[in-house]
Amino acid sequence: MSDRDTANRLESALRLAREAGRGILRHYVRYSERRAANPEIKSDGTPVTHADREAEKFIRDSIEREFPADGVLGEEYGESRGESGYRWVVDPIDGTASFICGVPLFGTLIGIERDGCPVAGVIHLPALGETVSGGPGIGATHVIDGRAPRAARVSAVASLREAMLVTTSMDYFQLAGKSALYHDLVSASRMTRGFGDAYAFALVATGRADYCIEPGVKPWDIAAVAPVIQGAGGLWSDFSGDMRTDQGCIIATNGVLQSQALSVVARHA
């Protein structure tokens, strides 16, 4: 497997994310008008809509045609194993709760793993017209519709007391039994904002926020954003400091802040 193999897949992931995003937006207009008062609730307590399932099916079917030897893991339809060493990890709508309420901060996430390691990813925010993509050794690119692509780079903020922390919600810390951690992070940071889901990681990768911490996440929430953060010059890990996507948590920072954030988290291990 060559770097070109990964680059080819990243190029396809960008195209698929944008095409899926166009389909999602057709549903978004409808949902945002009536706020889908009674979405289906899955067994894990999270909402799902027809748009989630339709987008994932489109992405999966396209991957299976273009890269039939690759594996696929998706939030809505589980895992199909492959033989190539590559696995695509798909979250068709990261931030379904925002999508249902007509809030535009949801995104389509497509991650690419090689031999179990995240090597490339796409964060596409269809309602905002923004896409951030890249990976370690590739760099990262930020595209806003109608503007020329530019390099995505993390911030240079060097201490938590000067940093903006973004996270989806205090609710997730409460559910994970880590309310005290949330309060310590707020106290340690200059500013905290609830820009969650895919949007939070796009903010970190483009230097508009300095770090993001999320408990209670799944591999499909992490596999795309982790390599993008690395490509933009940042670092990521689980709460133990390991670069794993299966531990239900992530710390993503501009790199300089990684050890400081891990130190706060370690006090609550």
Image (cartoon, rainbow, N blue to C red):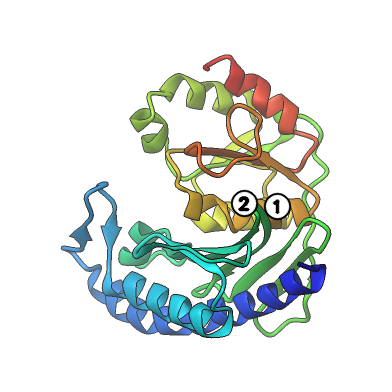
Residue at 66% x, 26% y: name it.
262
Q: Is residue 106 left or right of residue 6?
A: left
Q: Is residue 116 left or right of residue 151?
A: left
Residue at 57% x, 66% y: name it.
83
Viewer-side residue, 242 vs 157: 242
Residue at 61% x, 55% y: name it.
225
State the image quarter where residue 172 is shown.
Answer: top left
Residue 98 visible (yes or no): yes
Task: In the displayed orientation, state which residue is furthest to the front.
Answer: 83
Give the residue at mark 2. 116
State the image quarter where residue 152 is shown.
Answer: bottom right
- The x and y percentages for residue 72 are 49, 66
Secondary element at tag 1: helix
Residue 237: numbered disc = none
Give the residue at mark 1. 229
| Mark 2 to mark 1 CA distance (whole Å) | 17 Å
- The x and y percentages for residue 257 are 75, 33
Viewer-side residue, 137 vs 167: 137
Residue 196 visible (yes or no): no
Secondary element at tag 2: loop
166 vs 30: above or below: above
State the image quarter where residue 11 is shown.
Answer: bottom right
The amino acid type of the residue labelled 1 equals: Ile
* Mark earlier in primary sequence (2, 1): 2
Q: Is residue 1 left or right of residue 28?
A: right
Quadrant for the N terminus in the image: bottom right
Residue at 55% x, 21% y: name it.
184
- The x and y percentages for residue 140 are 77, 63
The amino acid type of the residue labelled 2 equals: Gly
